[in-house]
Amino acid sequence: MLRGVFVNFNVQVSCLKMVLSKVGGFWILFDVLLAQLLQLLTILWRGRADGLSLTSVLLQFYAFSVPIVFAMRHNFPVDAWAERLFLLAQTAGIVLLILRYQGDTLRGVLLLLSHYGLILLLVKYAASSLISKMQDTILPALVLSKLIQARANYCNGHIGQLSRPSLILSLGGALGKLSITGILTLLLKVC
């Protein structure tokens, strides 16, 4: 009777690596597809963008643009970087809404058009070394954007229009990336 309850698990390390990699990939994709979208919907629902730092969102916009420039420049297949395009469009919507609710819609439209024009110019004419150096600035830009938003939250005494589910997804995605990377590194050392 007890024998049927207890199961002897023979876990193959390569299978475990694959499963952890897939789970981590799906969580990261879930974070990418929903975190910014929830933020965008929160702003639209409430009709204001209180508490959001435009500088912080612009830094995120830059950080989401650079991988697209890199991928387009190196002719990567679209399915390898399409989620970044979706994330960039969501962030562009947030930038536009922040400026719209500040009464500066025209500046927002011009900013986005010039940014997309700059992306096309970089893809066509920028040196590969410049694009590679830009890749190195993504992480500092994202960290700085979070610090700027945290400072704005502290100065305002509240989180304004930040979506709580968006914050939870971003935190979970970051922890997922760290834990999956740590577990895979540990498994590689063991094997």
Image (tube, rainbow, N blue to C red):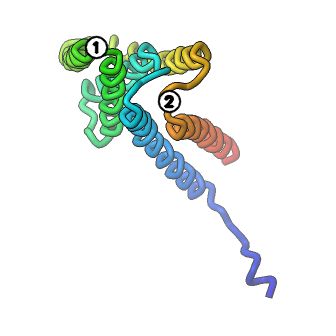
Outermost residue toward the right in this view = 2
Using a 10 Å C-alpha cutoff, classify the residue at mark 2 as few (fewer than 14 neighbours), some (14 to 19) or many (20 or more): many
Q: Which residue is mark 2?
A: 162
For the residues labelled 1 and 2, the Cα–Cα distance comes to: 20 Å
The disc label shown at residue 160, or none: none
| Quadrant in the rendering for residue 133 | top left
Give how far across and how far down residue 38 sits, in percent: 43, 39
Give how far across and how far down residue 9 sits, in percent: 69, 68
Looking at the picture, tell me which residue is in the foreground, 56 or 71. Answer: 56
Q: Residue at x 35, y 15 (%)?
A: 102
Q: Is residue 27 left or right of residue 103?
A: right
Q: Which residue is mark 1?
A: 104
| Quadrant in the rendering for residue 147 | top right
Give how far across and how far down residue 25 sits, in percent: 48, 46
Q: Residue at x 28, y 34 (%)?
A: 76
Outermost residue toward the bottom in this view = 1
